[in-house]
Amino acid sequence: MIRAVNASFVISAPSIREAPPEGLSEVAFLGRSNVGKSSLLNSLSDRKNLAKKSSTPGKTRLINFFDIVYKTDEAEYPLRFIDLPGFGYAKASKTLQKEWKKSLTEFIKKRASIRVFVLLRDARHPNLEIDEEAKRFIKSFLRPDQALVEVFTKVDKLKQSELAKLKREFPNAVYVSNTKKRGIEELKKIVLEKIFGTVK
């Protein structure tokens, strides 16, 4: 079993210039507002309130950093989670959205420490164009030392037949439920293997 033995908030930054120095391997989480990103970060860190849920989806415009140390029976794996602002929901002015997008794009492309992008998608709405657009965007600049992992959230809301269909359509994705704690251990393992290779 992979346990989070340490999980702490580092800083909130509005752009790459205010971000903490690079060093630890980083995992960037992105997805539409209200997809369950904060809940997943809390599940992955084995903490209830590490990532705060906003009462207004899409309100958060900051990039949040969390330091995590995972431990197995044989080794420790330090890394950093990056919680990127949710997209596709924010009630902001067009000018603000443009600036926000520019700042975020700059950060995502230039941050050399990011090793894994975790793209969250709502299992109940699997084929939204905005999610496909985000996927194409990440793939357009993905480096050889980076990986993209697609994660479908809220799978407990699906019927078995719906879930089976989704798995056929997206065979390489990870399927999670924060309420049922399904898929969390699998996602931990995949992330660590992408960064550290074999996990002991």
Image (cartoon, rainbow, N blue to C red):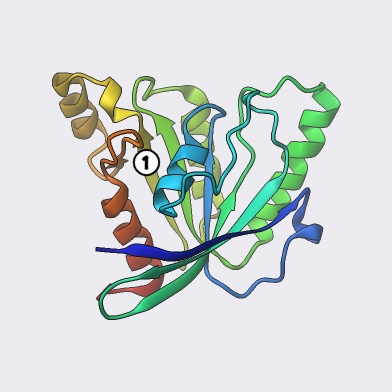
Q: Is residue 189 left or right of residue 86?
A: left
Residue 158 appears at what percent x and percent y? Answer: 25, 21
Farthest residue in the right direction? 95
Q: Which residue is mark 1?
A: 151
The mark total stands at: 1
Q: Residues within 10 Å of mark 1 (few under 14, many from 20)?
A: many
Residue 16 appears at what percent x and percent y? Answer: 75, 57
Residue at x 44% of width, y 38% of height: 120
Amino acid found under the numbered disc labelled 1? Val
Quadrant for the N terminus in the image = bottom left
Residue at x 65% of width, y 62% of height: 111
Residue at x 63% of width, y 25% of height: 55
Q: Is residue 5 left or right of residue 62?
A: left
Residue at x 61% of width, y 31% of height: 87
Q: Is residue 89 left or right of residue 144?
A: right
Farthest residue in the front direction? 48
Residue 118 appears at what percent x and percent y? Answer: 45, 48
Local SS, label 1? strand
Quadrant for the C terminus in the image = bottom left
Q: Is residue 98 left or right of residue 145?
A: right
Residue 105 appears at what percent x and percent y? Answer: 69, 46
From the viewer's side, name the closer residue of 7 and 59: 7
Classify residue 125 by image quadrant.
Answer: top left
